[in-house]
């Protein structure tokens, strides 16, 4: 189908005006818009220059299946239950899609450190589902969750609800700013 690039004829404009005569425009919608992040949140910025963060996360022992949840020893089990129910709300997110394992590990460490320094308590890490041929779980999904369990800033994590990313993301509870590791 070809699009006509000629301007409309005066008769066409008059026909349209006649057809719309007596039509009342609809009022604007009164529903609230959905915001994925609070208006006060400052987005995480990727910094191209090399960071001073020591890379001490290991891929060893990650296994073939990802952790569905993690709770640091000494943290109450009710903490994980509250996290699953959305307490506290997600304050920022990091998307690792399309990154190599090494790049994802470094960016995850930078992100967690910055979020802890900013005093944020709950963040989302999106790693994707990454289904492999043969039905296996994605490497980045397995490794990202394994790395989170090794990070000192992380108290707990669990899979997000289906509308927040489901099996392709985790909600992460960070230590309070006063209890975070020294910078």
Image (cartoon, helix red, strand yellow):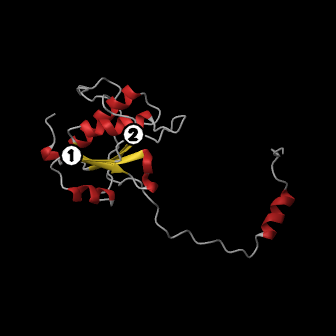
Identify the disc placed on residue 156.
none
Q: Position of residue 71 (x, y in %)?
A: 24, 48
From the viewer's perspective, tell me whether residue 22 is left or right of residue 76.
Answer: right
* Residue 60 is at least partly visible in this image: yes
Crowding at dot 1, Cα within 10 Å, few <14 / some 14-19 / many 20+, comes out as some
Mark 2 or mark 1, earlier in chain: 2
Q: Residue at x 30, y 31 (%)?
A: 61
Task: Tell me the quadrant of the picture where the N terminus can be found.
Answer: top right
Q: Residue at x 45, y 41 (%)?
A: 128
**With respect to residue 22, does 67 lie above or below?**
above
Residue mark closest to the camera, 2 vs 1: 2
Which picture quadrant has residue 65? top left
Mark 1 highlights which residue?
A: 72
Mark 2 highlights which residue?
A: 65
Q: Position of residue 155 (x, y in %)?
A: 22, 46
Furthest-top residue in view?
Answer: 50
State the SS at label 2: loop
Q: Residue at x 27, y 40 (%)?
A: 149
From the viewer's perspective, tell me whether residue 151 is left or right of residue 10.
Answer: left
């Amino acid at each position: 189908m070809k699009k006509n690039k000629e301007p409309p004829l005066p008769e066409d404009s008059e026909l349209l005006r006649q057809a719309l005569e007596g039509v009342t425009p609809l009022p604007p919608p009164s529903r609230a818009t959905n915001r994925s992040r609070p208006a006060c949140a400052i987005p995480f910025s990727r910094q191209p220059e090399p960071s001073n963060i020591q890379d001490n996360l290991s891929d060893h022992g990650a296994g073939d299946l990802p952790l569905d949840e993690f709770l640091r020893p000494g943290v109450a089990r009710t903490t994980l239950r509250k996290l699953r129910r959305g307490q506290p709300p997600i304050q920022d997110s990091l998307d690792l899609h399309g990154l190599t394992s090494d790049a994802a590990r470094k960016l995850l460490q930078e992100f967690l450190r910055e979020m802890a320094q900013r005093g944020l308590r709950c963040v989302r890490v999106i790693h994707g589902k990454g289904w492999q041929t043969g039905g296996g779980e994605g490497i980045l999904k397995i490794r990202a969750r394994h790395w989170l369990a090794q990070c000192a800033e992380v108290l707990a994590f669990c899979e997000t609800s289906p509308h927040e990313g489901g099996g392709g993301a985790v909600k992460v509870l960070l230590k309070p700013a006063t209890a975070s590791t020294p910078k």
